[in-house]
Image (tube, rainbow, N blue to C red):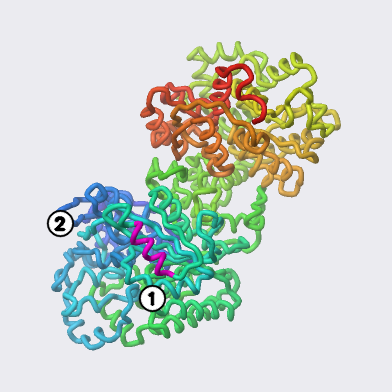
Amino acid sequence: MRDLEAALRSVVRGEVGFDVTSRALTTMDASNYRRVPLGVVAPHDADDVAAVLEVCRDHMVPVVARGGGTSIAGQATGTGIVLDFTRHMNRLVSLDPEARTAVVQPGLVLDRLQDAAAPHGLRFGPDPSTHSRCTLGGMIGNNSCGSHSVAWGTTADSVRELSVLTARGERLRLGQGWAGAPEGLRALVDGELARLRTGFPDLPRRISGYALDALLPEKGADVARSFCGSEGTLGVLTEAVVRLVEAPRARALAVLAYADESAAAEAAAGLLPYGPLTVEGMAADLVPSATALPRGGAWLFVETGGSDTAEARARAEAIVRAADVVDALVMTDPAGQRALWRIREDASGTATRMPDGSEAWPGWEDCAVPPERLGAYLRDFRGLLNAHGLRGTPYGHFGDGCIHVRIDFDLFSDAGIGRFRRFSEELAEIVVAHGGSLSGEHGDGQARAELLPKMYGEEMVGLFERAKGVWDPDDLLNPGMLVRPAALDTNLRFSVLPREPVDVVFGYPSDGGDFSAAVRRCVGVAKCRTTSVSGPSVMCPSFRVTGEEQHSTRGRARLLHEMLAGELVTDGWRSEEVRDALDLCLSCKGCRSDCPVEVDMATYKAEFLHHHYAGRRRPAAHYSMGWLPVWLRAVTRTAPVVNALASLRPLARVAKRLGGIAPEREIPRLATETFSRWWGRRVKERAGRVLRPVREGDASFGDGLHTVALLWPDTFTEHLSPTVGQAAVRVLEAAGISAVLPPTRTMAGRRGRVCCGLTYVSTGQLDRARRVVGRTLDLLEPLLDRPVPVIVLEPSCAAALRSDVPELLPDDPRAHRLADRVLTFAEALEQLAPDWTPPRVDRPVVGQTHCHQHAVLGDAADRRLRQLAGLEGELSGGCCGLAGNFGFEKGHFGVSVACAEEQLVPAVRGAGEGAVVLADGFSCRTQLGEVTGVRGRHVAEVLAEALDVLPRGAGSGRG
């Protein structure tokens, strides 16, 4: 390895990585398989690729080309050198609107090509559900398709010319008329014309094997087309000329509801004569909530195009009339269409979990049959599942007869793996009996290549081997794929994981308490590698800043997987590689909601930090910011002095250095009067408003205030922004809600303050967090048996109480009762004062939904509150980048600000005069103030200000 690494470094201008992290990040793709590479190279250009091939040929080391790493059959993994094209060879070289072509490098993400083509009214036809992160090189390697293939075909239909390097260093320009064919290929084809004319099934989604029939003279002897779908086994793509199609000016989406999946499948082929752009199918099993869909048990998503909205709608409505459906809807609003399409696109992730939460895996998610045979095939498929005691929910490209499904294989035990093999062999025979292809989109890889003789026969597979020998006589490129394949039940990625549960602190209730199962949630679909945020989504801000795999949710999950495996990452919880990858995780929890399988990297990070630093000295920031509630309570009575000292730059520099705080940050000013002290002073002034009625279960205060709720004095509201709490009290009282603070003594008489434990959790001090939360539950115990709602103003604290606390103390029923009572400010107004109308502000609004609110709490109530108050406009997605302690920690400032600059800062800077800047989180307000000089406000402050300008008595009480 040392010789190989040295040789590569001497000739390659791009990065060469033989370190543990680089190798661990590429052991897996989105399949069931795992292979450990020797190293990873990110080439700068085709010359770098040629140099890598020469060195690897000299050392007889195999080479695997890799794009986004979303392959589902194992073809993006290997034991030699992995070529990562996403870092440098990711450009759109040129785009010719007149010729409707584009020249692309293999690492270009599909969405970037679509973005460039859209202003010209053009697009690339194929669009897999991974369009936001899959690369053109990977699409060509797999001959990818996507939902629009009924209109625009596969990637092979969109390829004009390909620039390819063979394993022996020959540079070829592939095209029609035998252009670029390696020596011997034409002779091979000329000798097998009869077999090539009769040996391939005629169906739109035949991806399995080599497309040697594209070399027939009547098909133009198209070498480029034949190369598509070869999965990196014939040559290494360095550039491609691709064809673009005209995008419809307007689209409509008809969602057709059927009683069940079989009825939807039977109907799909009958819709093709109407010229739809898509005919996609899915069943109710894959939809967490079907409220946005028409009534039914399965749906077809049928998209139509037109020169304007009216024409597109008319075509969609014609299809609805022609279809025998239970129910239907037609959507022409682009935002509404995107929301509906997200339901379908997320199926590739949601399918990895059965309705009961158990795991399901790929391997047979990709078969295709003639569309008119789809209904019959699905019945046979279901019968085979039942015969083997397996479960799976099919979905996919019904109009092309291509079905995706994840199946709850047991890939851990010998018996389960044996059943996986038997099922695979029997299903292959069923697919072939229906005239189908083992792969209809994702390629054969290791998952299906072993079974190709069932589809093509031994002689045709022998012809594939001979073709491979013409292109790659040394078997250097992606060996074990397509020809002479590895067995489908070897190299399984689960085999290296521990068989016994790992000792952890969090409860992991959705994973049966098993940390390994939690890490296995990441199946590699890589939605976290999306390079731009759309809508309200958050995940994964650090990846979008750095562009590095180790700073994606998937990359971190891969490193945790390897940590548990113990083969590459050998020092377990003490691993510096895992620690460094997690260092730039903002703990924004965006992955908890935006990841289709709900990976919760913030929790995994806290767990890791807990074990990593157990019995060891921690970074200074863990003590300064992790223990923030303690320090703030300690200095609260000397706040003016502390503020004065912090304003002295030499003292501030020393304090920040000692506390591990970024020198670029300002130390926040402490409130000279805490929120609790203000509240206590106010209570004395307004006699009778005490905690006694709550303890006694009395919900009447006798002064026009009819509902009692506990108002949570979080650390930030208490010590740093008490004006938010004061405003909230004003608004709650106007709505008829009496806010009281939690008790400060337990039933045993011990004094204390409630705390959600967030700062301890985010720094991985989980033992301390459990003690703090346990004390909080002791304080609240008298109230938890009563239906007293708990209003939390700080979104991150509300999220901690609703999710982290019950997961930290899974066996304490008080933690779950507290979580069930937590309400955000907007939820409290909506649920506790449903008849109250907030004052009208009638101003535009900008800002950002707090990432924890987006991921854990939801913002539906906030949206409705803003609408009632006349706060018009959408808040941006992404993360502010400060993220609690993250942005304050030394070394994080640049990434922190870059996260803010992605969406939040441009939105605020571009806001019109008079716009309200909303930021419910203390971190968001702090980041805005430091980066833009603009003060963001909590919605409670905005509403309280509006109340103050109303005539006396207006906007208060009920009705």
User: Along the horizontal axis of the image, is 767 left or right of 581?
Assistant: right
Residue 834: x, y in percent? 64, 36
Which residue is pictured at 68% across the width and 42% down the height? Answer: 805
Residue 371 is tagged as: 1
How far apart in space, not on screen, are marks 1 and 2 (Cα)? 33 Å
Mark 2: few/some/many CA within 10 Å (<14, 14-19, 20+):
few
Inspect the image, locate mark 2, and give the three-letter code of the amino acid beneath it.
Answer: Ala
Task: Check disc 2 and report its element: helix, strand or loop.
Answer: loop
Which residues are drawn in magenta?
Answer: 313-323
Residue at x 65% of width, y 61% of height:
500
Give the side of residue 843 with respect to residue 605, left or right: left
Measuring from the top left, give residue 767's x and y in whole percent.
Answer: 69, 40
**Looking at the image, is mark 1 or mark 2 earlier in the sequence?**
2
**Where is residue 94 drawn, in percent x and y?**
19, 51
Give whichever of 121, 665 is nearer the camera. 121
> Toward the viewer: 332 or 688?
332
Query: Which residue is farthest right?
Result: 748
Vertical relation: 551 (above or below) 886: below
Which secondary structure, mark 1?
helix
Which amino acid is tagged 1? Answer: Pro
- State the image quarter where residue 397 is shown: bottom left
Viewer-closest of 617 and 403: 403
Which of the labelled discs sits on residue 99, or is there none?
2
Of the 4 image quadrants, the one containing the N terminus is: bottom left
- The reply, left or right, for residue 677 in relation to residue 491 is right
Q: Is residue 33 visible?
A: no
Answer whether residue 693 is magenta in the image: no
Q: Quarter holding the C terminus?
A: top right
Residue at x 37% of width, y 53% of height: 133
